[in-house]
Amino acid sequence: MKKAWQVNITGPGDWNFNKDNFIGIEIKSDEYLNFEYYEDAIEFIDSINSTNKYCDNCLSAHYLITEFNTYPEKILNSGEINIPYNFLSEEVIMHNNEQTELENKDKEIPYYELSEGEEFLEVDKNRFE
């Protein structure tokens, strides 16, 4: 197979997709998502992209379609896609769930219990604006 067009899909936690990460869909590429024809690369992206931007059971990812082995890299198409879970392997779904948990933990307000003799200091927030 002549590898002329490369599709790079990056999901949460910088997950880089390959052909094995997709199930139940025919992909006309090698294992690294290198396509012989540009039209096949576009067809693949269109086939896995949900048109519902608010899809609850979708993974949000970014994609690039580049000309294979070019320097500097020639980007032909790029964007954001929503991939329904029914096209994704269990490994990808588990990784996405772990990343979501980590993101939610980052949003939590930390709880700190004062030790005896410690006290919170009030900071004038206006001084830092």
Image: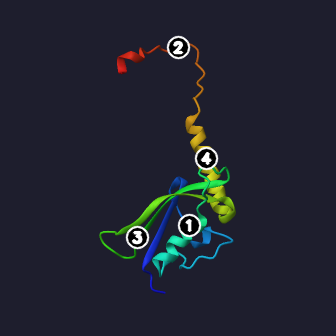
82 in relation to 4, above or below: above
Pick the residue in front: 88 or 107: 88
Q: Which residue is mark 4?
A: 100
Residue 110: x, y in percent? 57, 29
Pick the residue in front: 120 or 64: 64
Residue 11: x, y in percent? 54, 57
Q: Dot 2: within a 10 Å radius of its alpha carbon, few (fewer than 14), some, or many (20 or more) residues?
A: few
Q: Residue at x 59, y 76 (%)?
A: 27
49 in relation to 27, above or below: above
**CA gap, disc 3 to disc 1?**
16 Å
Which label lies toward us, 2 or 1? 1
Helix, strand or loop at mark 4: helix
Q: Earlier along the polypeptide chain: callout 3 or callout 4?
A: 3
Left or right of 76, for residue 25? right
Disc assigned to residue 66: 3
75 in relation to 96, above or below: below
